[in-house]
Image (spheres, helix red, strand yellow):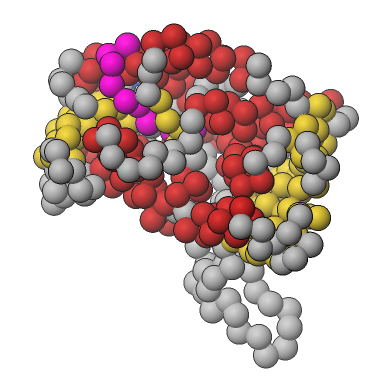
Amino acid sequence: MPDLHLGLAGVGRIGAMHAANIATTAGVARLTLADVDAGRAGTVAASLTGGTAEVRATDGVESLLRSGIDGLVIASGTAAHPELIRAGVDAGIPVLCEKPVAPDVASSLPVLEHVAARGGVVRIGHQRRHDAGYREAKRAFDAGELGWLHAVRAVTCDAAPPPVAFIATSGGLFRDCSVHDFDVLRWITGREVVEVWARGSNNGDPEIGRVGDVDSALAVCTLDDGTLAVVTASRYNGAGHDVRLELQGSRGTLLVGMDDAMAVRSAEAGVSFPAGPAHTTFAERFAAAYRAEVAAFVALVEGTGEDDLCRPEDAVAASRVADAAQDSLVKGVPVQVEPLA
Ligand SMILES: NC(=O)c1ccc[n+]([C@@H]2O[C@H](COP(=O)([O-])OP(=O)(O)OC[C@H]3O[C@@H](n4cnc5c(N)ncnc54)[C@H](O)[C@@H]3O)[C@@H](O)[C@H]2O)c1
């Protein structure tokens, strides 16, 4: 197996986790970190001395790109994704960028054009595609074990909100959280969402409303074969970090996320399932999926593996549903989702 040198741009909340995963991924010999906050890059590098890769920090993205890296992972804030994707593509190296491609669909489309024009290899971090439960759901649906779907219910709830400063730049609850559900909805069913009707509420910290977001939301989605899906999200789920997908079909029903760490309790007498404790954060819930995603990117850089990472066109298609949900939320009416040209 070749010894790769990977670069990572952005080592905040999720970037620091990716750094730790990359530093212990087979095939990676060196990892170089860059962040606009150079001190943060140095601190994260210093904390990663026990892995299989040599980790060091550099003083910026330009020097990162000049350091001979074989692949670039981007975990900066969303606003910097377009410029960093372009920089990686222009350097001729494969890129794995955290979701989304850009803050909204309008600013994503020029990035897709640039990637296509340069023949760039870019994949987007939708880690649920690497989660064992979501993969089993796709396998079962594709195999016909569920029949046709009469109801899909997707849940993404944080136990507690992230800082309001992050929420202010997140694009809203649908673009930040539900976009994962919109992605798996398309990925598992192979259908397009054609209409979204969304509602939201603010019963938590009033600051979230003041920065223009809701803290809880619901979207009713209609797929192009008529299948109905309900996607719900909240920043205030005291029972824990709750991520579930229920596929209810004519032949069978399957629930992703139904294990002892599911953040619910039964109302039935004598039922002790789930035994707990519940998941508390996305990093914990998807720890194995994030590792599998990085391993898939390493395989892509090496030219091995099946390359089942999310394509940028699919990520933008999911963002298009999130944009429509946000639009519906603001306007109070159902919104049609225009297909990607
Ligand atoms: N897949 C998931 O489950 C998931 C979860 C959380 C966040 N995310 C995505 O990850 C990204 C980062 O989120 P976060 O919560 O870690 O944010 P964060 O604010 O904690 O960290 C972002 C980091 O990027 C750095 N940065 C900003 N601009 C940069 C640039 N031009 N070059 C290098 N570094 C730069 C910042 O200094 C900061 O350290 C967001 O796009 C978010 O949507 C994905």
Q: Residue furthest right?
A: 333
246, 33: nearer the viewer: 246
Query: Residue drawn at (62%, 28%), measured in percent from left and top?
Result: 317
Where does the image place residue 71, in percent across and percent down from the top left? 26, 28
Which of the pair 255/213 is nearer the observer?
A: 255
Q: Is residue 40 left or right of residue 239?
A: left
Closest to the observer, 85 or 314:
314
Residue 323 in picture, x, y percent from top left: 69, 27
- Residue at (49%, 30%) from the top-left corner? 311
Query: Residue at image x 57%, y 62%?
Result: 257
Specify whether residue 254 is in view: yes
Q: Relative to the observer, which residue lies in front, 167 or 245?
A: 245
Name of the residue lying farthest toward the front: 143
Quadrant of the rendered image containing residue 179:
top right
Quadrant in which the C terminus appears:
top right
> Looking at the picture, does residue 225 appear above or below residue 264?
above
Figure quadrant, ligand 1: top left
Q: Is residue 96 left or right of residue 186?
A: left
Does residue 197 belong to the magenta stretch? Answer: no
Q: How many marks?
A: 0
* Residue 233 falls left or right of residue 59: right
**Residue 95 location in percent, x, y?**
35, 26
- Is 284 situated above or below 93? below
Provide residue 224's location: percent of width, then percent of height: 78, 36
Asked whether residue 207 appears in the rendered view, the answer is no
* Residue at image location 48% in from the left, 36% down from the top: 310
**Segment colored magenta:** 90-100
Q: Is residue 230 above or below residue 110?
A: below
Picture quarter with the N terminus: top left
